[in-house]
Image (tube, coloured by chain):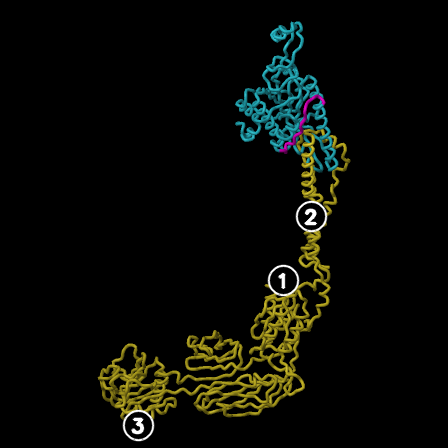
Chain colours: A cyan, B yellow
Amino acid sequence: MPYTALLDRQFLEKLERLTIHWQKSFNGLVGGRNRSRFAGGGQEFLDHRHFHHGDDVRAVNWRAYLRLEKLFLKMFQVEPRVPVRMLLDTSESMTSGSGVKFDYARKLAAALCYVGLVRLDTIVVRPFADKLGEGIRCGGGRHQFSPVMEYLSQLTTHGRTDTLAVAREFLSIHPERGLLVIISDFLDDTGCERPLQYLADFGHELLLIQLWAEEDRMPPWLGDLELVDAETNARLELQFNEASREEYTRAFDRYAAELQQLAIRNGGRYVGVSAGAPLEEVIFGSLVRARVIA
Amino acid sequence: MYFLNLSLAQFLALFGTVSATLVLLYLLDRSRRRQVVATLRFWVAADQSSVVQKRKRIRQPLSLILQLLSLLLLLLAIAQLRFGTPLETPRDHVLILDTSAWMAAFSKNPGSLSQQRRTLMDEAYQRALAYVKAAPAADRIMLVRADALATPVTGFESNRRKLAEAIFLSKPGSTALNLEQALAFARKSQALDSGRLGEIVYAGPGRISQQQTLLETTSQIKNLRVLPVADPVENCGFRKIAVDRSTKDADIWEVYVTTRNYGAHSKPVVVTLAFGGALVGARKLTIPPGADRETTFEYRTRAGGLLEANLAPHDALPEDDHAVLELPAEPAISVLVYSAHPELLAPIVTSIPRMKVVFRKPEQYTAATPAGLVILDAFHPPAPPQADAIWIEPPAEGSPVPVRAKLQNVQFERWCSDSPLCAGLRTRDLRLGAASVYESAPDDIRIGQAKEGPVIVARGGKYKTVVFGFHPANSDFRYELATPLLFANILRWMAPELFRHSTVTAGSVGMVSADLERDVRPQDVRVIQQDGTSLPYTIRAHTLRFFSGTPGTVRIILADRELLYSLSLPELWETKWEAPPGIRRGVPNLRESVAASHDLWQELAALGGLGLLLEWLLYGRASRLLRRTAHLEMVKRRVRKAS
């Protein structure tokens, strides 16, 4: 499937001026864009310090030694290539109801991948539900965008969400810290807070993008309802009225606020996105304001 | 309280059906629905907060009640709920206004000078207008003028001004009232066009032409109302005047005058007859009430002219006190006789009174002649006459029919039997001294024949011709009785209008019947109006009937007879119809009760619509739509804030 099916060319052209940003400093391979507060083998001079045993003699400032007869070591600023990983929720809950969430999530993931490719970042995209799926590593410029689009277009939803299992698997596969973008509805019956905290504790910078459909936040139905969980097929019969709806919405908003606090508390960021909002407005509005991209 | 459009049972059935449907739809709309959701996590919290209710209980009962109430109001509006009684609903009436000839009679006798002279029509106007005013404003009325025919003047009309104008424009006609037909027409009109059945109202004195089966008909009409017009008037008038030629003397007209007393008292009258303005006769009669009297006059004249009959003194209805008949002049034909011996033919041709004979010498002959008949006595004209002609002993070389032989002492053998020319001719042992025998053509009529051949031949064509092979006045034939009869037959054959018998009758317009002889053939009958156009007629059992609705002259032309009808007399009633007991009479008083009537359907419809709108706003999709829109706005605000 051609990528233009998800994003049109005009929209991609608008994305080319954007860059993915992260807040933490990571050790990484030289050649990235973001400056690190760690000194290292960069190109740009940072400072001098006294030479200690074991330092690389190639970094000694020999001119200063000849004049002062003391060994000073030149320090350079590191501009590492930070690994960017993107987890895309492909559980059944993403297609429940009107089914717009999953489509919206794929478009959003594609847009972020394109932004990263334009700035020569390397992004690993992996789907997840009850476990991590086979992902795709994209890098090498915008010309490598087609395989990403093809990959995203072929994704389907299946299974239930098990965030804890996914977090464990992710940490075992990707020990190197980096930026972790999670695009999901975060509707895990067992809760997402603990696994996300694990990921943050292991040094990953979390960028949580929570997607919801309108009926997820404010169900339009009233009266006697028989509800079926899209992932577990669990059933619940209840009478739903205006008061119940208001309580439902409050509970949903509380959960979203908890996710936001978790992200901020761990130095990450949180963006709540309604699937009814235009994609362009979300990218150039919500994500830019959250300094996810600039 | 009542319904205009539905009965109570119909209304309840309809309301029950619609209500049941509504409740079913309501329950269906609020039945348990299966929804697939992303998670049950937040639903559980919502379920715990909701009040536990019985599952079978109807939720939002106010919505259902509001819907049912609105529906009830709308159905009441459709049924047109009204206060009062059903009599107050608009109805369609038929007003039959009597415009028969009798309505021209003055309601007061002319002698009573203190009273203003008003006709029965004026009285009927008054009653009809009173009824129109008394009828409720919403009622519609159809005006029908009734005489011999029922003529609708308006449709079912609620405009009182139009109705009043139509009533005032109604004038008495010339025929008698056929009330049965008018009532039948009114019933049919109500059945076909009426919305809600109203009354059939008859305004008039009830003087009808024939009783017929009116009594049975009117007793079956339950919605009949009579606005009676009193007609205690004294009237005598001509019913019929017949004028015929006397059988004794063709120059004498016999005039038969029939007069009727329509009043309640015996009355002396004088019948006078005038011809051409000169009084020719007068008779004094005393006519008992309700009786006819016939009187006869004789008047000798050959000339045509106007015969006027007058009845004195004049009474309540002057129209039937005077009649005028046009008497035809006695027909005659001019005959030119070219003869060298006129004294021989004079006894024969002058014996027929309708022939105006002029004798001339053969030398004075001209082919072009204004005469209707030319008799050529034994000479050969240079050119044949341009008229019907009788040739007597024409020379062989100039005979219109070729001469086969000229014989002496001829024995006359027989007359033809199949031609009207020979009707009544009888001779025995007739011998002719000399006679020409003709070579007749196949189409020729051989009137008289000798053993050797025809001696009298008739030939048709543009100009009819009869050829005598002998001289009828200069032979033994002059002694025969058949001689004048033969000339009369020839004259009837050549000019039949001379012998057509005329009867003049002054009668009344309407249906006219005339008795015909048994030998009259239908193809010989023509009925012609004054303007020359044919009038439809029927012949049944030797009686010819036709109808003329307007005064005028109608001619019935038969083969040898003409009946001239001068239809100038009004057709008056034969009997008085009395409304059966139980029939409503007089002008009703409906206005006051109807004034209290009030239409409610507008208010009911508005309330019903308002109720449905309220329900839609409070409980319908409108409220859901508004809530969702408000919620979407709130979500957007929160997302922006969070970002």
Q: Chain of mark 3?
A: B
> Of helix, strand and loop, which one carries label 2?
helix
Give the left or right position of residue A98, taking residue A257 as reference: left
The residue carrying mark 2 is B613
Dot in front, 2 or 3: 2
Q: Determine contact: label 2, label 3, CB under 8 Å.
A: no
The residue carrying mark 3 is B343
Q: Nearer the viewer, residue B546 or B383?
A: B383
Co-location on one chain, circles 2 and 3: yes
Location of residue A128 in the rendering, given as x and y in whole percent from the top left corner? 63, 22
Of mark 2 and mark 1, the one earlier in the sequence is: 1
The residue carrying mark 1 is B195
Location of residue B88 in the rendering, given as x and y in whole percent from the top left corner? 70, 64
> Of helix, strand and loop, which one carries label 1?
loop
Q: Which residues are magenta?
A: A265-277
Badge 2, how many Cα within 10 Å: few under 14, some, many 20+?
A: some
